[in-house]
Image (cartoon, rainbow, N blue to C red):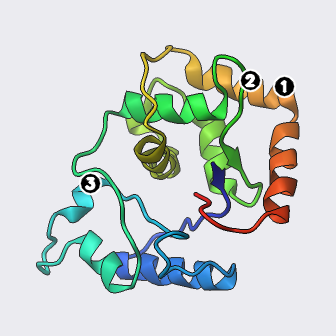
């Protein structure tokens, strides 16, 4: 699993859709190809807004493909799926973040398991965990210090695994990356 880029700007759903399309075109991702680009949004986006159109409908109108749950999974299940992909109990790393994803990296490094509801870093984490939980389907009981432990383990690695993954990413065809 790879986070290959991010769009981290405020705006309306239509503005976000336009930014996603622009990012995909700039990086040679065919956003209309369901096998290459799939959005996994928060399930509440299927609710209609004041205009009578849902956020999901607006994203689809822009030509984007959506695949996500019909109800939001528990935060602990999303967090556990993400953390197990970042580093499993056996030390296996299956989720890599490109260094260009500065907001996501900052969010992971500053967010603690406690106080999550009041943290300014939850938005990027939520966006990431919805995708990983939906496709990886990993669930387990949480460890109360898991965010801190994962951050310390990553720092101890010196990001060597991420650099190796980034080199591998640039050498392989961009197909089915999430």
Mark number displayed over residue 43: 3
Label 1 crowd bin: few (<14), some (14–19), many (20+), radius 10 Å: few
Whichever of labels 3 and 2 marks the residue nearer the N terminus, that label is: 3
Does the residue at mark 2 contact the one at mark 1 (Cβ under 8 Å)? yes
Q: Is residue 40 above or below residue 164?
A: below
Residue at 57% across, 30% down: 83
Tag 1's secondary structure? helix
Residue at 38% across, 85% down: 62
Q: Observer-nearest residue: 66 or 51?
A: 66
Tag 3's secondary structure? helix
Q: Is residue 31 above or below residue 67?
A: below
Q: CA distance from mark 1 to mark 3?
A: 36 Å
* Residue 99 picture quarter: bottom right
- Asked whether the viewer can see residue 159, the reply is no
Q: Is residue 145 left or right of residue 79?
A: right
Q: Is residue 119 above or below residue 32?
A: above
Q: Position of residue 108 (x, y in %)?
A: 61, 39
Residue at 65% across, 64% down: 5
Give the residue pinned by disc 2.
Answer: 152
Q: CA distance from mark 3 to mark 2?
A: 32 Å
Residue at 64% across, 17% down: 89
Q: CA distance from mark 2 to mark 1?
A: 6 Å
Front tag of 3 and 2: 3
Does the residue at mark 3 contact the one at mark 2 (Cβ under 8 Å)? no
Does the residue at mark 1 contact the one at mark 3 (Cβ under 8 Å)? no
Whichever of labels 1 and 3 marks the residue nearer the N terminus, that label is: 3
The count of marks equals 3
- Asked whether the viewer can see residue 66, the reply is yes
Give the residue pinned by disc 1.
Answer: 156
């Amino acid at each position: 699993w790879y986070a290959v880029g991010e769009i981290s700007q405020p705006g309306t759903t239509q503005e976000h859709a336009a930014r996603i399309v622009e990012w995909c075109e700039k990086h040679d991702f065919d956003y209309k190809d369901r096998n290459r680009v799939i959005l996994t949004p928060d399930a509440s986006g299927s609710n209609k807004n004041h205009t009578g159109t849902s956020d999901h409908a607006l994203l689809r109108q822009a030509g984007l493909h959506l695949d996500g749950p019909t109800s939001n999974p528990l935060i602990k299940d999303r967090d556990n799926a993400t953390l197990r992909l970042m580093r499993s109990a056996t030390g296996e790393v299956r989720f890599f973040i490109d260094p260009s994803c500065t907001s996501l990296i900052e969010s992971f490094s500053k967010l603690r398991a406690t106080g999550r509801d009041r943290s300014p870093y939850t938005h990027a984490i939520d966006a990431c965990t919805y995708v990983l939980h939906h496709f990886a389907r990993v669930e387990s009981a949480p460890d109360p210090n898991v965010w801190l432990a994962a951050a310390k383990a990553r720092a101890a690695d010196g990001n060597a695994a991420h650099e190796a993954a980034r080199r591998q990413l640039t050498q392989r065809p961009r197909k089915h990356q999430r």
